[in-house]
Image: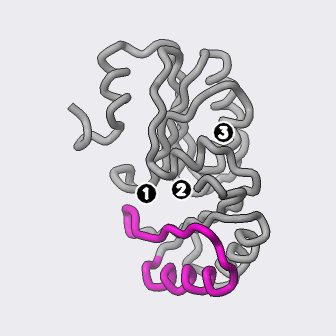
């Protein structure tokens, strides 16, 4: 997504409606990037990327078409490169510093919080996981100096203050080496060990 200046992410509760929404979005605007698909538990995600104007136009079409099936959505002009990398499943090495974890019941809220967090402090995003194996939640693992991770976590949580979105977050000043090694490989139980 190196030419991506903006992204929009829509979370819907219907595969059928989600497919119709994705089709309407790309028919309305020539976005450079689209990824669609299901995540647990029965949610449908649409991620589009491109120039700010392209993404805004596609996002508007998605909002108009989504109706009651739309659970949550975001649009991020000026999205941080680390967020794009993480959404492309590129993992960064954990620096031997603090680990912060952001967990949200809304997948779009999780991506928004990751973007705010990485823009607010000198931290690195290790991973963003969305939906599968998480009961439909989204998580982000951050690393850096303790004070930077704490500030980034606070900024990420503050960016999503809505009663309907459950939020959990932690900062672990120094992980045990064995836990750090396993998290460096995967945060999925089936992908570790």
Q: CA distance from mark 3 to mark 2?
A: 13 Å
- Residue 93, how many percent across, how many down? 45, 27
In the image shown, does 1 or 102 lie closer to the viewer?
A: 1
Residue 145 magenta-highlighted: no
- Badge 1 marks a residue whose secondary structure is loop
Residue 24 magenta-highlighted: yes
Q: Which residue is mark 3?
A: 157
Q: Residues within 10 Å of mark 2 (few under 14, many from 20)?
A: many
Q: CA distance from mark 3 to mark 1?
A: 18 Å
Picture layout, residue 77 above or below residue 125: below
Q: Quadrant of the N terminus?
A: bottom right
> Which residue is depicted at the point 66% across and 39% down?
157
In the image shown, does 145 or 43 lie closer to the viewer?
A: 145
- Badge 2 marks a residue whose secondary structure is helix
Displayed quadrant of residue 186 = top left
- Residue 62, how many percent across, how many down? 65, 78
Picture layout, residue 41 above or below residue 85: below
- Residue 169, how many percent across, how many down? 55, 33
Query: Could you tell whether 11 is left or right of 123 in the image?
Result: left
Q: CA distance from mark 2 to mark 1?
A: 7 Å
Span highlighted in magenta in the image: 14-42
In the image shown, does 144 or 31 lie closer to the viewer?
A: 31
Q: Residues within 10 Å of mark 3 (few under 14, many from 20)?
A: many
- Kindly identify which numbered label has been placed on residue 171: none
In the image shown, does 54 or 136 lie closer to the viewer?
A: 54
Q: Which residue is mark 2?
A: 107
Q: Earlier in the sequence, mark 3 or mark 2?
A: 2
Q: Residues within 10 Å of mark 1 (few under 14, many from 20)?
A: some
């Amino acid at each position: 997504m190196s030419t991506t200046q903006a992204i929009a992410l829509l979370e819907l509760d219907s595969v059928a409606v989600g497919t119709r929404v994705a089709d309407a979005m790309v028919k309305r605007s020539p976005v450079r990037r689209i990824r669609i698909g299901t995540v647990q538990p029965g949610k449908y995600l649409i991620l589009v990327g491109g120039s700010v104007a392209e993404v805004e136009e596609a996002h508007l079409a998605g909002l108009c078409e989504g109706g009651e099936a739309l659970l949550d959505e975001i649009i991020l002009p000026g999205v941080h490169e680390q967020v794009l990398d993480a959404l492309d499943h590129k993992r960064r090495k954990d620096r031997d510093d603090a680990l912060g974890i952001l967990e949200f019941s809304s997948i779009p809220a999780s991506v928004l919080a990751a973007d705010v967090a990485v823009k607010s402090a000198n931290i690195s995003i290790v991973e963003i996981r969305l939906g599968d194996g998480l009961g439909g939640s989204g998580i982000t693992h951050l690393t850096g100096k303790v004070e930077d991770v704490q500030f980034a976590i606070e900024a990420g949580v503050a960016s999503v203050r809505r009663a309907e979105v459950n939020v959990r977050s932690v900062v672990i000043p120094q992980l045990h080496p064995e836990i750090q090694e396993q998290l460096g490989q995967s945060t999925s139980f089936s992908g570790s060990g």
